[in-house]
Image (cartoon, grey):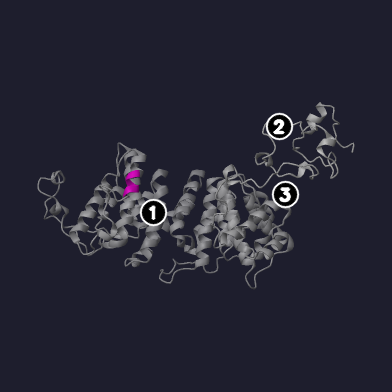
Amino acid sequence: DGGGVGAPPPAEAVDEADGELHALLGHVLEKGMLLCNDKRGPVLAENVRTLKLLLGRWAPRLGAKLPLRRLLILKQLKARSKGDEAREVQWRKAALHLLNALLANHLPLADDEAATTIPGGHWTRLMPPGSPALANAPPAASDAYTPVGPTELLDALLSCVKHARKAVYDPAATVLGQALASLGGSAAADKLPACEENVFKYLSELSMSDYTQAGTSRLLVLLDHLSEGYPRLLELRGRLLAVWARSKLLEVHGDGRANVLRCMTHAAARERSGAGQEEPAPLRGGPEGVPPVTTSVTKEVWEGLLSQQQPEVQHASLRLLLELAQHHPLDKLWPLLPALDAALARHRAVDCRALYHELLIRLRERAAEPGAAVPDAASETLLRSGLLVGLCDPDETRREAMLGYWHGQLPRSMAARLVACFETLYAPAVEAQWLHISTLLLLQLVHGAPNRHKTIFVKTLLDTSSFQPVGNLAPTRGSASLAMLPWGHEFFSQSQPASQDAGEGGPLRATQSQLYSQTQTQDQLGGVPATYSSQAADGGGGGGGGG
C-alpha cells in the first residue's frame, strides 16, 4: 500500500477498458479470499484487512467491472463440517467478513445476472507458459460462469443468523442488515419485500417461542445489529419488534439493556430522517397509529438509566439522548439535566464524557434557535456549567475540543471577550479554575493574529552573551537602596570584585528598606551581612527593623 516493491498498482493506473487486467485483478482478490480460511484469528483478520485495502483502492474506479465471483462467498456461507465445528465457524466468519468488505466499498451484493462469462476471458490466458499458477488451473477456454443472485446470498445470510454460535450469528446480523439496505436501492429492489418477510418471520417467531434468558439475549443482539444497517425492520407490522425490544428495557441488564437502547436509537434516527421514497410499502399493519417507542421513556426511567454504574448502558443512553436532541421537544429534555450532570460531568470513561459534551452542545444550539423552548435559569446554569467543566477535563483531547468550542462562542475582540470572562465563563462548579480558563480563552485570540508565528526572542535567558553591561550597576555612596538593584547585577558590575565577601557591604537578596535610607551610607552602616540569617548569626538584630 505504500507504493514500494510489490505494492498494488494505484487506482489511476488501472485502465477502465482493459478487461483482461480486470480479470487478473479479480483473480488476485479471489486468491486472497481463499486464503481467508486460516484457523488462526489474527491471520484471518490480517488477510481480510489486506483484501479491504485492495478493494478500497480498486473498487471506487472499477465498481461493477471488477470481476469477483460471489459463488466463492456463497459456498463459504453455506459451509458445513460435521466433525469439525470450529472449522465451519471459521469458514462462515471469513465469508461474512469478505461480504462486509464488498458492501463497505459499495460493490453490488450479487453478481450481474447478465454476466454468464468472466469478463476479459479466463485469467490463465495472462499467465506465461510454465507458470506454477497453471498447475491446477482449469482449461483456458472454461470462462463460463453461473451468476449468484441476491436471493441466494440473503438466504445464506439468514441461515448464518440462525446459527447456534454467537461467533457466526453476531456478525451475520450486521452483514444481513447491510445487505438489505444495499438491495433497496439496486435493480433487484423488487426482491426486497420477500426477503423482509423471511427475516421478520424468523425474528417474530423467536420473540414468541423462546422466553429463556439466553433466547432473549440472542434476539436483542440480532435486533441491534440488524437495525443498525436496516432500521426499517423495527417498523414492520405496527412496530412489533420495536415494541418488544422496548418492553425488555427494564427486564434485562448489562449488554442486553445496551442492545435495547441501541435499537431505540436506530428507530429514533429513522423517525428523524423519514422513510425513503424508493422503499416498498411496509408489511400489513404498518407503523401508522403506533407511537414511537422512545416517547414511552419517562423522566424516572431516564434517571435510573443514567445513574447506572455500567459504562456500556450509560454510553448507549447518551447515544439515544443525542439522537432525541436532534428533533425531540426540548421541554422534555431540560428536566434531565440534573441527572446528566450528576452522573456524567466527571464520569471515569472518556467516551461517555465526550458524548455528554456533544449532547450539551446540541441542546445549547437548539435552545438558540428561533421559537425553541428556552430553559429556565437552573437548566441554563447546568447547561453552561457542564460545558465549562469540560475545559478542566483530565483528558487532554477533551480539553482541546472544549477550548475550541468556547473559543468559537466568545467575541473575537479583546475587550468584549474580557467582559465575557466575567459573565459567560463563570459558574460555581468552575470557580476555582475560573482564572485559568479565562486566561486560556484570552490567549486563544493570539491564534488568529497574522504574525503569531513571529519569533520574539532569538536567544534564551540562559545565554548570558545576549546581555550587554550597562554602565556600573554597583551601589555608590549616597545611592538608593541596594534592594532595588536588578537581579543579576553582580555579573555586570565592573567595580565590585568577584571575590568580595558577602558581609563586606554586598547587595542584599531581599528587601531591607529599614536598614537603608536615602541618608545612610556604607561607611555609616559598617559591614552589614547580606541576608537576614547571616545578620542573626552575627548578632546583628534578627528583624532589622529597629530603625
Residue type at tag 2: Gln
* Residue pictured at 36% horizontal, 40% vertical: 42
- Can residue 164 be seen from the camera position used here? no
1 or 3: mark nearer the eye: 3
Residue type at tag 1: Val
**Label 1 crowd bin: few (<14), some (14–19), many (20+), radius 10 Å:** many
Task: Tell which of 304 and 403 is nearer to you.
Answer: 403
Distance, label 1 to label 3, CA atoms, is 51 Å
Quadrant location of the C terminus? top right
- Disc 2 is placed on an element classified as loop
Q: Earlier in the sequence, mark 3 or mark 2?
A: 3
- Disc 3 is placed on an element classified as helix
Q: Residue tagged by mark 1?
A: 175
Q: Is residue 2 above or below residue 450?
A: above
Q: Residue tagged by mark 3?
A: 432
Residue type at tag 3: Ala
